[in-house]
């Protein structure tokens, strides 16, 4: 995998080091900077203008003081801003994927907004990366308002890169959940699987969360065994991709098949099977649409994952060798 993956490449010269963020005067100066701008997102999507992610002057935003500092670009400070109002009843706000649960376009998409998935598919590379950074940080703040140690409401610190508990002093850092995704290869064929909720005909690389106390290599081996009853050899790392739905980091591998035949009876997958190089090549000619609205069945014709997904990149990297 040589080209950058979708959701990477945020064009910030500087994410703002912790040593500067620890100085409240420096953080306040970023908020007051006349060039301070914000990526604006909420459950209806991310704001866009003229085919780019909109960077709205911070001074124009009603609750601009609550914006989270992402870093600085060539013009000045860049923030992330949650445009949804906090809930009056104190109940946890709905999860923001800037679109649907997986970032699909919201029903009746508003003008001037795109869903998070669309930000990666339609906007320039750097804008997709910035959208992913903003969404991952906004999501984390929405879902981690209380101290995991003592239960007290926490305060935002370091311009948004940490939350600190005023009662017990615990610091809480934005979390990233590692996910291994692997293409099992046996010479001129590869193993792909599908989940029942996926669109008609869609198959993809196997994937799963890394478990506590597990290395990436062990996670690859375990997931392939659990999902498809196959034994594999040593995985070879290919590339990674932030996947902010809500906070994953996809770690992509090629891994050689060792023994066994695919068996997806373990109910996580609807099907898992080998595809020949010829079948993959034919399917790769189609630019798969990203239709998540209509779950289908295995179908007669293979459809690969969309180009913005690292799974597609793992498959195409294999095809090109
Ligand atoms: Zn606490």
Image (tube, rainbow, N blue to C red):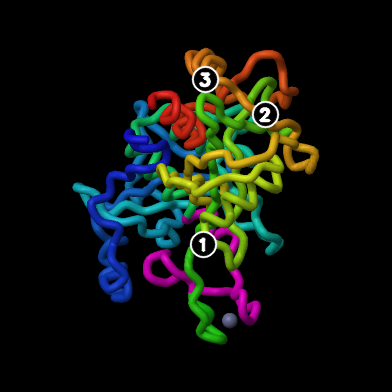
For the residues labelled 2 and 3, the Cα–Cα distance comes to: 13 Å
Judge depth for marks 2 and 1 and give the one in front: 2
Instruction: Pick out the residue farthest to the front.
Output: 259
The residue singled out by tag 2 in the image is 273
Neighbour class for label 2 at 10 Å: few (<14), some, many (≥20)?
A: some
Q: Is residue 321 left or right of residue 20?
A: right
Give the image location of residue 83, x and y in percent. 51, 48
**Residue 192 visible in the picture:** yes
Give the image location of residue 12, x and y in percent. 27, 49
Give the structural element (helix, strand or loop) at label 2: strand
Query: What quarter of the picture does the C terminus occupy?
Result: top left
Judge depth for marks 3 and 1 and give the one in front: 3
Neighbour class for label 1 at 10 Å: few (<14), some, many (≥20)?
A: few
Q: Earlier in the sequence, mark 3 or mark 1?
A: 1
Q: In the rendering, which numbered label is found on residue 277? A: 3
Q: Is residue 311 left or right of residue 128?
A: right
Q: Is residue 156 magenta?
A: yes
Who is closer to the viewer here, 258 or 89?
258
The residue singled out by tag 1 in the image is 175
Span shown in magenta: 137-163
Q: Is residue 146 above or below residue 304?
A: below
**In the image, what residue occupies the spot 33% across and 45% down?**
10
């Amino acid at each position: 995998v040589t080209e950058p993956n979708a959701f990477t490449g945020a064009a910030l010269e500087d994410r703002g080091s912790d040593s500067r963020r620890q100085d409240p005067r420096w953080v306040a100066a970023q908020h007051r900077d006349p060039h301070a701008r914000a990526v604006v997102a909420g459950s209806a999507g991310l704001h866009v203008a003229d085919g780019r992610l909109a960077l709205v002057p911070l001074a124009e935003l009603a609750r601009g003081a609550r914006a989270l500092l992402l870093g600085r670009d060539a013009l000045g400070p860049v923030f992330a801003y949650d445009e949804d109002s906090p809930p009056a009843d104190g109940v946890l706000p709905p999860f923001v994927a800037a679109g649907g649960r997986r970032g699909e376009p919201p029903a009746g998409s508003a003008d001037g907004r795109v869903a998070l998935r669309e930000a990666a598919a339609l906007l320039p590379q750097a804008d997709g990366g910035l959208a992913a950074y903003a969404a991952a940080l906004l999501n984390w703040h929405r879902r981690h308002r209380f101290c995991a140690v003592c239960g007290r409401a926490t305060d935002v610190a370091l311009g948004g890169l940490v939350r600190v508990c005023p009662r017990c002093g615990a610091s809480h850092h934005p979390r990233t959940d590692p996910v291994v995704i692997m293409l099992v290869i046996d010479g001129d064929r590869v193993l792909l699987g599908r989940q029942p909720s996926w669109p008609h005909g869609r198959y993809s690389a196997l994937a799963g969360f890394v478990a506590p106390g597990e290395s990436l290599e062990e996670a690859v081996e375990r997931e392939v065994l659990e999902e498809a009853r196959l034994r594999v050899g040593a995985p070879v790392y290919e590339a990674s991709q932030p996947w902010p739905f809500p906070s994953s980091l996809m770690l992509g591998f090629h891994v050689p098949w060792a023994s066994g035949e695919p068996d997806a009876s373990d109910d996580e997958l609807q099907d898992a099977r080998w595809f020949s190089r010829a079948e993959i090549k034919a399917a790769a000619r189609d630019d798969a649409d990203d239709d998540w609205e209509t779950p289908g069945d295995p179908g007669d014709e293979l459809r690969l994952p969309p180009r913005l997904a690292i799974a597609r990149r793992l498959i195409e990297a294999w095809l090109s060798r």
